[in-house]
Image (cartoon, grey):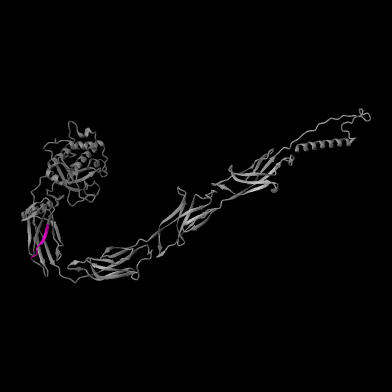
Amino acid sequence: MKKLRKRFMSFILTFVMIFSMINLTEGEMITYAAEPTYKAYKENVTYFYVMQEGKAGTEEVVYCFNKDLDPPDEVKEGKEMVTFTRVDGTADRFYRLVNNKLEGFTEEEFYEKVLSVLYHGYPRANPVDGQSIKEKYELTDGEFRYATQAALWRLTDSESWDKLAADPNNNYDINPNMLEAAKNLLAVEKDYPESFSLYLFLPPASATGSGGKAYQNLLSTGMTTTGNEPEAQSEPEETTGSLTVSKTVEGDGADETKDFTFTIALGDTSVNGTYSEVTFTNGVATITLHHGESKTIEGLPLVEYTVAETEDDDYETTPPSNASGTVTENGTTVAFTNTKKQPVEPEKVSVSVTKEWNDNNNQDGIRPNSVTVKLLADGKDTGKTVVLNEENNWEGTFTELDEYKAGKKIEYTVEEVNVANDYKATVTGNAETGYKITNTHTPETTSVAGSKTWDDANNQDGKRPASITIRLHADGKEIEHKEVKADANGNWSWSFENLAKNQDGKAIVYTVTEDSVEGYTPTINGYNVKNTYTPGKTSVTVTKAWTDAENQDGIRPLEVTVKLLADNVDTGKTITLNAGNNWEETFTGLDEYKAGKKIEYTVEEVNVANGYKATVTGNAETGYKITNTHTPETTSVAGSKTWDDNNNQDTGSPKTGDTSNPMIWLSVMMIALAGMFLTYAREKK
């Protein structure tokens, strides 16, 4: 009895250990002995180690592959390290475990290349041509270790050199020497001893890392930091089991002769061949069973399975369509029961429809008062309609509709009848959530264009502004304005585009106004604006002055002519000055500006009389004075006195200043004046 109990416990223990050590990688199922197991961990982001459980000082340097999965966790207080199991890394097993291997190698070449990298990489650093690659590129231990990992990632994960040199997930800056060392490791030909072999460390299938993915696989060649070389573990003989699938059909009207199809998918895609008359291809097989039948498949590996039954609309399946589990040595049974579905009263459904308008709130006023929507079932008109309008808020529902026809669910759709002119109807939604019919109409648009006309003598006074502001009004309300300037040709024009033509179905009246322009009077004709400006006028007064001793010589002309000059250019305008106008006259109605610049008016006497010199003083604002100057001619009279008085016998000669005989002096003066008059009279003749 004790021996029986002991054998039973040994069997149970062996079964549990083997079952717990199953590892799935890309569909491969590997079974191996439970001893020895290792705790895997990482340090400094890219340094990976394993340590045999319960044996201090057995740390081994390892490298990872299948880089897209999660690496081992860092050692943290209170965090349990994941247990990995070591197995022999045979060429075929290793080749199958690598997910994204570099192409161009056979299975054996790939295996040899990895061993060569490990033989010459960290920490062994075996020499190549008398010098290790580490020494050749003067690398530290850490740099050489990462170069070794980079070379392996290039092989096992097809990583490009560029990505390895700048992969932010590596958290390690790889320098050019490290990259060249990695390339050299890959270039070395096979020169390791035949006894040099590969070990693989495989995580439990159900464990996930910090990133939520399965753990990466690890590899080494027994290189330890303590000199302890791990012992290779041999694999036990593979154990097989069986899987049984059974079918039961029940219910009123059930067809017990009807065949039902099942698809069996094993977790090991390498299973190929015939097992108990069932043929597997890449771990997948198909069988058919009818009521009361079952099928047992023996000799299967102890792997996970899924059995899926092809659904039949006439039957309910228990379990629901598929079942999964693990093939066991004692045999696993999956029982499927199909129950015939019984007819039920057809359910009724309803379909709602909503109308939406996209016409800028009926801007053009052409929206119809109501629309009619018809219902289609599987694309055919049912004859049912609903009318949508404002009273029902443009919503309606088709009710009491059959959900199925001939066992197939009816597809209900809707369509608007006689879509209004200038509208386009678009249907969205579905029968379950309701349909929405959107009627779209693009409102009519118009434009307003106008031009500016300047009536200002071609901007004679320079008062025309550099720009004007035109404001657009819709039904009297300003909606837009523009600053308008002259174009390259001197034309002033404006336009307002894409304007709504209607509002609430009524044509919008557009008008324009112009911000006031100083000195100008606007006249609006439609969308055109004329600005009028009367150029300023001025006058210039001219006065004649004579400096000729009151015409002493009698040569002053009776009148003179004065011409007007504008900016030193003869205007052709003249005035006549004479005694009749008191020698004063004014040029009137003169333009004040020309081309925006104030005109400088001057005057000039025409044909100044002989003997006179004309001098102009004053200015256009205060008036000009032309002074004509003439210096009258002069003459002289000379004579001598003779005394016949017997030498002034009676009284003596008179003395200067003597006033005793005034009559004598008066006579002398009269004689002198008479002489002057005679002289003048002769010259006049």
Residue 643: x percent and y percent?
Answer: 89, 29
Please give left or right for residue 215 compared with residue 470 in the image: left
Residue under the image location 61 percent in, 46 percent down: 573
Residue 274: x percent and y percent?
Answer: 6, 53
User: Is residue 1 one of those drawn in magenta?
Assistant: no
Against 495, residue 220 (above or below) is above
Pick whichever, 536 or 324, lies toward us: 536
User: What are the residue bounds of the magenta stretch?
Assistant: 257-263
Question: Can the viewer see residue 46?
Answer: yes
The quarter in which the N terminus is drawn is: bottom left
Please give left or right for residue 532 compared with residue 242 in the image: right
Extreme residue toward the front, this view: 685
Question: Can the viewer see residue 228?
Answer: no
Against 585, residue 510 (above or below) is below
The quarter in which the C terminus is drawn is: top right
Residue under the image location 38 percent in, 61 percent down: 444
Give the mark count: 0
Extreme residue toward the right, this view: 650
Pick whichever, 250 or 513, lies toward us: 513
Snapshot quadrant of residue 242: bottom left
Snapshot quadrant of residue 193: top left
Pick whichever, 237 or 449, lies toward us: 449
Residue 657: x percent and y percent?
Answer: 87, 33
Please give left or right for residue 539 compared with residue 643 in the image: left
Residue 654: x percent and y percent?
Answer: 89, 31
Snapshot quadrant of residue 230: top left
Against 414, residue 664 (above or below) is above
